[in-house]
């Protein structure tokens, strides 16, 4: 019998990479995408454990699992840092700082 690939590995990899990119911008999208990727990886792990000889890309699955865990951790760190900063300085000060930064960059 020919080995097949696990069904969710590719989409989990794409979600993990997008989540990593989102971690650089904002924490929450990275957390969401990393969580979905980790859920898909866990589904494929269960599928692999039922019939390990039927699937060929388990090493890719392990790599994607590591990436999605890293994305979750980075997203949580970024989210907590932002929440702490807003708590310390206040929402109005954050908005004002963002406005000043946008004006310096010539965006607004």
Image (cartoon, grey):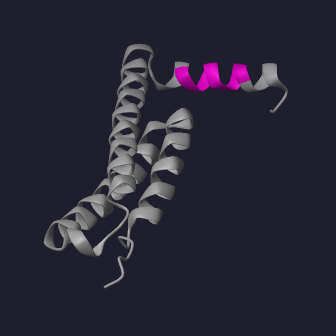
Quarter of the picture holding the C terminus: top right
- Percent position of residue 10, x then y: 47, 64
- Percent position of residue 96, x then y: 62, 21
Q: Is residue 77 magenta?
A: no
Report the residue at 35% width, 40% height from top.
72
* Residue stretch in magenta: 94-101
Q: How many marks?
A: 0
Q: Is residue 99 magenta?
A: yes
Extreme residue in the bottom direction: 1
- Percent position of residue 80, x then y: 35, 27
Q: Quadrant of residue 27?
A: top left
Picture layout, residue 43 above or below residue 103: below
Picture layout, residue 46 above or below residue 72: below
Q: Main secondary structure of the magenta part?
A: helix
Extreme residue in the front direction: 1
Foreground of the two, 71 or 47: 47
Report the residue at 32% width, 63% height from top.
40
Q: Is residue 102 left or right of residue 39?
A: right
Q: Quadrant of residue 87?
A: top left
Extreme residue in the left direction: 50
Foreground of the two, 46 or 101: 46
Report the residue at 36% width, 82% height from top.
2
Q: Is residue 37 left or right of residue 101?
A: left
Q: Quadrant of residue 89?
A: top left
Foreground of the two, 10 or 72: 10
Extreme residue in the top direction: 88
């Amino acid at each position: 019998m020919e080995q097949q690939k696990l069904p969710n590995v590719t989409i989990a990899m794409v979600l993990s990479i997008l989540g990593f990119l989102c971690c650089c911008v904002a924490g929450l999208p990275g957390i969401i995408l990393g969580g979905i990727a980790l859920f898909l990886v866990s589904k494929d792990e269960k599928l692999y454990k039922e019939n390990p000889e039927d699937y060929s890309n388990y090493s890719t699955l392990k790599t994607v699992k590591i990436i999605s865990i890293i994305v979750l951790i980075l997203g949580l760190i970024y989210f907590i840092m932002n929440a702490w900063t807003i708590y310390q300085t206040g929402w109005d000060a954050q908005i004002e700082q963002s406005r000043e930064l946008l004006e310096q960059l010539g965006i607004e």
